[in-house]
Image (cartoon, helix red, strand yellow):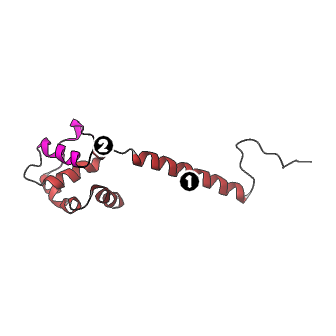
Amino acid sequence: MRDETFMNIGQSPPGPLGKLVRIAALAAISAGLFALFWSTVDPVNNEFFNLYAGAKIGPHSLYDPHGFTQVARSLHARVEEARLYYTRMPYFAVLTKPLAWLEFPVALAIWRAT
């Protein structure tokens, strides 16, 4: 006779309840990792900062690293020398200018959603 009252450690309950427990655990772990990494993201350490700073600065002094430093400091971000230059053609700064009218987190969320 099989005794199903005992389960091994780490084993989820059998049946639909077990599947639900595994899904809930996976969702909780994913949410925790997302919260951990999302809160530690520095604006200068992502690709969008380059586009956002270029749109803020405008096409006239687009390739001046001093302007990028000012934008990074306005975001209270750690400044990395490697990210303080514009990597696109000037027309791209004009096309992304509407994003510069928004706060950085809002602009980043819109950029990632599209």
Furthest residue toward left:
60
Q: Which amino acid, by three-letter code, is at mark 2?
A: Asn
**79 left or right of 41?**
left
Q: At which x and y percent is residue 85?
A: 17, 42
Which of marks 2 and 1 precedes in the sequence? Answer: 1
**Label 2: which secondary element:** helix
**94 left or right of 1?**
left
Q: Quadrant of residue 114?
A: bottom left
User: Who's the residue at 34% across and 58% down the image?
Assistant: 109
Residue 11 in view (yes/no): yes
User: Who's the residue at 27% across and 40% down the image?
Assistant: 78
Residue identified by numbered label 2: 45
Looking at the image, do the residues carrying marks 1 and 2 touch, with CB atoms under 8 Å apart?
no
Residue identified by numbered label 1: 27
Segment colored magenta:
63-88
Q: At which x and y percent is residue 31?
A: 51, 52
Front residue of 89 and 29: 29
Q: Which amino acid, by three-letter code, is at mark 1?
A: Ala
User: Who's the residue at 71% across and 59% down the image?
Assistant: 16
**96 left or right of 6?**
left
**74 left or right of 1?**
left
Estimate how packed mark 2 is, as few (under 14), some (14 to 19) or many (20 or more) residues with alpha carbons within 10 Å.
some
